[in-house]
Image: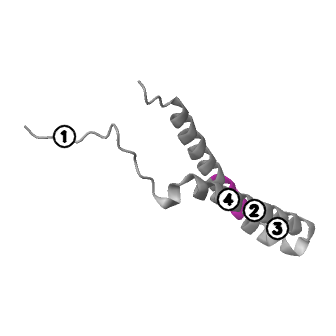
């Protein structure tokens, strides 16, 4: 008979790039990039010479908003799962 190790009492290690602090710092940085891209969109719209390059700040804004949204959803899901965890049951 072989001994099977159970993970009941072992804490799962998370990588450094998936830690809560890193995710919060990433979300703040992505928000700053989104504001920078919004300023770029405003400049590109007000100056007709830069209208051909409007796609650059729009792409930057969309990507930063998408990635920040994914990280926020991941953090919310992780915190929701931890609050449902009952170690006594």
Quadrant occupied by the N terminus: top left
Circle on res. 4? 1
Disc 4, SS: helix
Rendered image quadrant of residue 46: bottom right
Say few, some or many: other residues with alpha carbon within 10 Å of mark 4 (under 14 / 14 to 19 / 20 or more).
Answer: many
Q: Position of residue 23 (x, y in %)?
A: 60, 55
Disc 3, SS: helix
Q: Residue at x 56, y 35 (%)?
A: 80
Q: Which residue lies most toward the front here? A: 88
Between the C-alphas of marks 4 and 2, the distance is 9 Å
Which of the two labelled residues, at mark 4 and mark 1, occupies the earlier sequence position? 1
Say few, some or many: other residues with alpha carbon within 10 Å of mark 3 (under 14 / 14 to 19 / 20 or more).
Answer: many
**Which residue is labeled 4 in the image?**
64
Q: Is residue 81 magenta?
A: no
Q: Residue at x 45, y 53 (%)?
A: 14
- Look at discs 1 and 2 and give the one toward the viewer: 1
Which of the two labelled residues, at mark 4 and mark 2, occupies the earlier sequence position? 2
Decide if residue 21 is on the left or right side of residue 39: left
Quadrant occupied by the C terminus: top left
- Look at discs 4 and 2 and give the one toward the viewer: 2
Which of the two labelled residues, at mark 3 and mark 4, occupies the earlier sequence position? 3
Say few, some or many: other residues with alpha carbon within 10 Å of mark 2 (under 14 / 14 to 19 / 20 or more).
Answer: few
Give the residues drawn in magenta, as a range.
60-66
**Which residue is labeled 3 in the image?**
40
Q: Which residue lies most toward the top here? A: 89
Decide if residue 87 is on the left or right side of residue 82: left
């Amino acid at each position: 008979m072989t001994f099977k190790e159970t993970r009941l009492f072992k804490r799962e290690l998370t990588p450094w790039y998936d830690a809560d602090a890193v995710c919060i710092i990433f979300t703040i940085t992505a928000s700053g990039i989104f504001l920078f891209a919004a300023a770029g969109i405003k400049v590109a719209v007000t100056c007709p010479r830069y209208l051909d390059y409007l796609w650059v700040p729009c792409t930057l804004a969309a990507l930063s908003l998408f990635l920040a949204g994914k990280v926020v959803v991941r953090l919310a899901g992780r915190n929701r799962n931890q609050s449902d965890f009952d170690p006594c049951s």
